[in-house]
Structures are given as structure tokens and as C-alpha cells.
Amino acid sequence: MERPVFKAVGTPVEELDTPALVVDVGSVKHNIAEAHGAFASGPSLLRPDVHSHLCPAIAAMQLDAPGTVGGVAVSTVGEAEVFSENGVSDILVRNLLVTKSKIVRACGVASRCSITVVVESAANANLLSQIASESGVELGVLAQVKSPGGQIGAASAEVALALARAVLELDGLLFKGLYAESEFPSEDAGSNTTQTLLEARAALDNSAIDVPTVSVSANEELFNSGGAEGITEVIAGAYALMDNRHTAYHSNLRHAAKILATIITHPEPEVAWLDTGQKASSIDTGLPEVDGASGVSLSRMSAEHGGLVVEGDAQNSLNVGDKVWLIPSDIGNCVNVYDFIHAAENGALEAVWDVAARGRYS
Amino acid sequence: MSIYRPQIGTPLAELDTPCMIVDLDALEHNFDVIADLYADSPTKMREHAKNIKTPIILHKQIRAGGTMGGICTAKTAEAEVMVEGGLTDILITSQVVAPDKLARVAALSKIADIKLSVDSDGPLNELSRISSEMGADVGVVLEVDTSMGRGGIRAIERGVELAKMTNDLPGVTFRGVMSHQSLAAGADNDRESRFIEGRRYIQMCLDVKDAIEAEGISVDIVSTGETWTYDVAPEIPGVDEVQGGTYALMATQADYMDAFQYAVKVLSTVISTPESNVAVGDVGYRAMTSPGGVLPRVDGIAGIEVESLEADVIVLRSDGEMPLDVGDQFLLLSAQQDIMVNRWDQFVAVRNGKVEAVWPILARGCHH
């Protein structure tokens, strides 16, 4: 587990042990107010995707804000276990659960919390039904509809209808509606995903099947418009902390999460290295970006170190020991390598939050 | 902590997935390669803990043989975990500059033989001040840049200056020199090329040692080399230790090092088969990483390629009919294991298809 030099509340954030993941609470509040405000008055509600921060303290802030369905989305049963233990009462698990042990664990969570799972086949629905019945619990079920360009889900409205009918017949399962995943970035694909979902919904409506929920995830276009008619909930998560790859889509949101790094060597005028590399930032979707330091940019990262290119006046002013802020590329992937978030208000440490669901891949 | 921890004896088929496993036969094979090669050599292994992050596995190599009895760590917090895990001789291979962290290094040196990589005089003075105030003594090893363009002195004279300076300072003791090499991207990696490049880089480190010794300062430790030079280093007189890391678990980016076997793998389950030749597995880049976009490789099943790795799923495509069905398991090999290991909290150690041990990765997340 991460084990930084813990600093007292009130410590200026630049004095934290590095690498440190620092979250500005004021910016989180701003982002939540902006995003949730759109849903409070929009056609759909928001289901915060806590896979993007893995942190119960942030989930609580999201669920306290208006415009939500009152529950969260996670990717794995392990994440559902953590968030249910931390008081969340309504959880949608987005990854398909196909093995007995996973379903048994999901049923365990369902005994104390409303759990909704996603299915794409009648065979999977049968297995879920059998285990839920044996466990004496009820699992909510959304039928996944394959989005354009996606891999998983019912391939047509007809297949989705047949799947819904199959689920409706089964004990231990409560059919709740439809679900689709968008690809990121989704500005173009988004409307196609919405259209695909609405077509499936129409097929169910025409067969007099009640569809209380129509849920879509990771869709920047729907997110910005507060949803769409016929879509009941939009799943989104990166908005709370933000990251580089979402910057282009959400100019009203602030980069609330940054990594504080230290220059540990400056061996040549144009070369300096940070104590922060791939392990402490996760670069699968791209390098982090240096924030607020002119003449300094990140050119590469090795496992443990970040390589800076230093230009102009910065070559003279930059020193070993100086701190540099980095904005991560993919916030969920970055938070996942930390056990602690240093929460700051006005540049001073306010609290240390557990990233309680980090590493819960199964 | 309510993380799923399988019982000893659990068959692979019953493990919840995704699950990072370590194949004990392969791990022990890799440790034996080192033990055999270095048994009668003055050069010994100083295994790098940054890859494994788990004291019990590092102790296994020390018990197998071929080591100098100690290890490297990349970071201060890793060194603390290793000392608590019973390791007594540690070289921290990254520079440490913050005063509160230098104090942690100095504190550790009171209970273990601690050496820190240094490449500039500011942090060296600070280390001396803090260590001497604490009544501690920290070993100083100068890093020499040979090929990475990262930390390390660029000129031999600079090494001599810093060695002399260290000798004059309280709270620190000059111990030696170190370097870390990388083969240039796209360079030939056959044995002959490795030996030519490896000798050239390691000689740059030895040149600094010779210049320091010419000033009458003794150099106890020349610590250099890594997995790709593990067999080059012992052929060069004067190399005391090799900082090997990748060899223990292996990664596909080092597949040309064919003396070693793949010991770390990720077990995944097929969750969907959207087409007759496509399967989707339950692990993505968040758990596996794909550094530089290099994808994992399916282990032991011919004719299946990894098509893409998304955040939480992997897409496999087969030449003909996909042999895997929903619920079937498969194993993946990582392109670069130490970044992947850092994302997991435990190794599930497996032999003959069953769990033999579960080892917490105690230094996971110790980036600082």
C-alpha cells in the first residue's frame, strides 16, 4: 500500500510527500454543481460512475447533489462490495457477470443494497436467476443493447425484446430496462447509441413491456445536454475530477485532480527528471500534461521517472527539489494506482480520502 | 480490506478473475538461472525490488543463491517496506532530494545497510546535514549516466568531484558507482549485439570507478547491469553486482532473453463471444497496462491474437472458430510487468494448476 509521509491538515499542498494525488475540493464542488445542475433540469438523471474515482468520499458528494438517480455505477462486483460497505444503496454493475462465484458475490451485495446487473444473453440470465433464487435475493436486470462499434450486447431491437421476455419469465430477477455503452470519445457515436437504444425501447413499448430504465454510459454529448427524451439515466464519472482526455468536451469543468511531483535531477540545462513515472500516473491513454509551469513540458515517462524538456528562462530558474503539477490523461486509471487522495481547500491539506475501491478488478 | 483471497489448494479454474498469478515453477527456474550463473563468479545479483515489490519473493532469490545478499529499490517507501520485510542491505537507485524523505533514508540506515544513489551536490549536502544530525550514516553510490539520458553524472570528472566531496562530509560514506542501461528502441537484441552494447555502457561506469580510485578513494561497489546484460556483466572484470529485475517474472518486451520463463500471468474469463471468431475477456488496461500501446499476448493457445485492450475488457480474435466460449478462462502475458504488478495487491502463486500461496504485494503504490 502507498505510504507517504503524512502531513498535518492545514499543510500547504506543495509540501506534501511526492508523488501525491491532490484533489482541490472547491473544483470538485464546482464540477458537481455544473454537471448535476444540467441533469436537475434536463430530460434524464445522472448515475455517477464511481469507477472514475474509486473513492466513497467523492461518491457521497455526488449523491448529495441534485439531479441523480440516487445510486452509482461501478464496473466490477469488487467495486460494488466496497461502495455498498460505504453506504451506497443503489448500484449498477456494468461488466457482465458470467461465473458462479461472481454472481454469488453480487447476490451477497444484493442482500443489503439494490443491485442491478447487465445481461446480453438468455443463458446468462438463467444462471443469474438460478443463483439469485438460491440466495433468496432479487437482482435488477438491464438488457444490454449493442451500440454502433461496440462488441457486447443484443445485436438488434428484436434480440433485445426476446432477451427482455426471457428475463421477465425468470425468478429472482427484476427486469428494469435497457442499457448501452458508448465508445469514448462519443460526440459522433453518441447520437447513434441513443438512437439504437430508443429503437430497442420502442420494440419493448410496442410489446407492452414496462421499461422503467433506459441507461447509457460514457456519452459526452448526452452528458452535456443533461440527457435526452426517452433516456432515463446517463452514466458519467470523469466530470467530478476531470482529466486531460475530457478537456476538449467540457470547457466548463475544472481539472480538480493533479499529481504533485518533484524534480530529482537536472543534469543538463534542457533536461530534468521528476520522481513520478508511469507507475504513479498511468499513461495507457497518454502522458500527463504539465500544469502551470512555462517552459517545462513532459516528453516521456519511464516506470519510475518523468522526463521534462526545459526551455528558455526555465533552464535557469528550475532547480532540483522544485515541485511540478501534472494533469493525468485518464483519471480513473490514475486514481487506481493511489491508495490515498489528498483533499485540499485553498491550497491547504483538508483531508486524506481512501481510494477504497482501487484494484478491485474482479 | 475485503479483497478476495483464494484458499490454498484452489484449482486455477475456480479462481475469481481477473487474477494475477505467479507460476512458481517458472519463478524458481528463473532464480536458478541466476544462482547457477553467479555461483562461482565474483559478480553477484542484487535483485531489483521495484519489479516484485514483495519481500518474500526477494528472499526466495537470496535463498536460491547467486546474490550478494541485498536488493535494490527504486524509492524510499519501497526501501522501508523491504527493511520491515527482513532485507538488510538496500541500494535506493533513484535520487532522493526532499528533506523529509532524506530523513527517512537516514533513519533506515540505523537499522539496515542503506545506500542512496546521488548525482548532484545539493542533495548530497542536504543528506549529509540531515544524516549527521540524526547520528546516522548513509552510503553514497554515484549514479553514472551511460545510455538513458536520465539521472546520473555526465562526466568522469564530476564523479571524482562528488566522491571527494562525499569523503569530506559527515553522516555519509562513499561506497561506489552504479548505472542502468537500456538497449536503444529498435536496436538488435541478439546475443552478440547485447554483449557489444552492454560492454560499452558498463565500461562507462567502470571508467568513473577507475578515475575515483586513481585519487586514492576506494570504490567498494560497482553496481550495474540489468536483465538484458545479466550474462554480459560477469564477463567484465570489476563489476560487483547486477541490478536485475525483469528476469524474475519476465515480460514479452524482453522475450529475446530466452533463458527465462514467463512467471507472471493474468487469468481472465471470457464474458462474451459476439462473433464466431471474437471473444471478449474480463480484463482491461486498467489492470494489465499496455505501455506504448503494446498489447498483452495470449499464453499457450495458438491462433488467437489480442485485437484491443480497453479500460476493463480485452478483445481476442482467432484465425478460425474461436476455441473459447463464455465462462472459459485464458492466460495473458504482459508486455511490461513491473507497471502491471504495481496495480495489484497480491500475487496468487500457483503450481500444477493449484494455488500454493497468496502473497500481498507489500510495496504496491510505494511510488514515493
Image (cartoon, grey):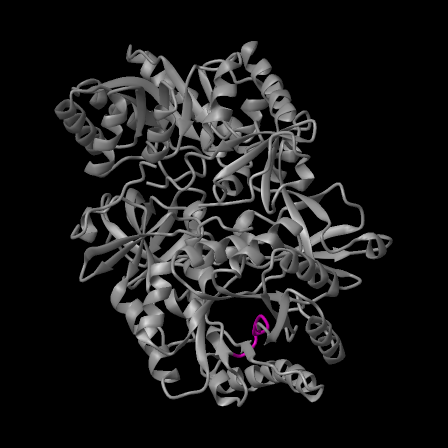
Which of A63/B324 is in front? Answer: A63
Q: Which residues are magenta?
A: B181-188
Give the residue drawn at x 42%, y 34%: A356
Instruction: State the quadrant of the N terminus of chain B.
Output: top left
B183 vs B281: above or below: below
Residue B187 drawn in magenta: yes
Frontmost residue, A39 versus B264: B264
**In the image, A197: left or right of B163?**
left
Q: Position of residue B298 (x, y in %)?
A: 34, 59
Tell me what residue is drawn at x 74 percent, y 65 percent.
B121
Residue B153: % across, % down: 70, 72
In this rendering, position of residue B40 left or right of residue B211: left
Image quarter for residue B272? top left
Q: Is residue A142 above or below residue B312?
A: above
Residue A30 visible, this orientation: yes
Residue at figure coordinates x 42%, y 76% from the top left: B257
From the viewer's side, name the closer residue of B273 and B40.
B40
The residue under the point 72% across, 72% down is B168
Is B228 positioned to the left or the right of A21 in the image? left
- Rendered view: B19 above or below A330: below
Horizontal placement of A321 versus B88: left or right? Answer: right
Quadrant of the rendered image containing residue A31: top right
Magenta span includes B319 = no
Q: Main secondary structure of the magenta part?
A: loop
Quadrant assignment, res A127: top left
Q: Position of residue B273 (x, y in %)?
A: 29, 44
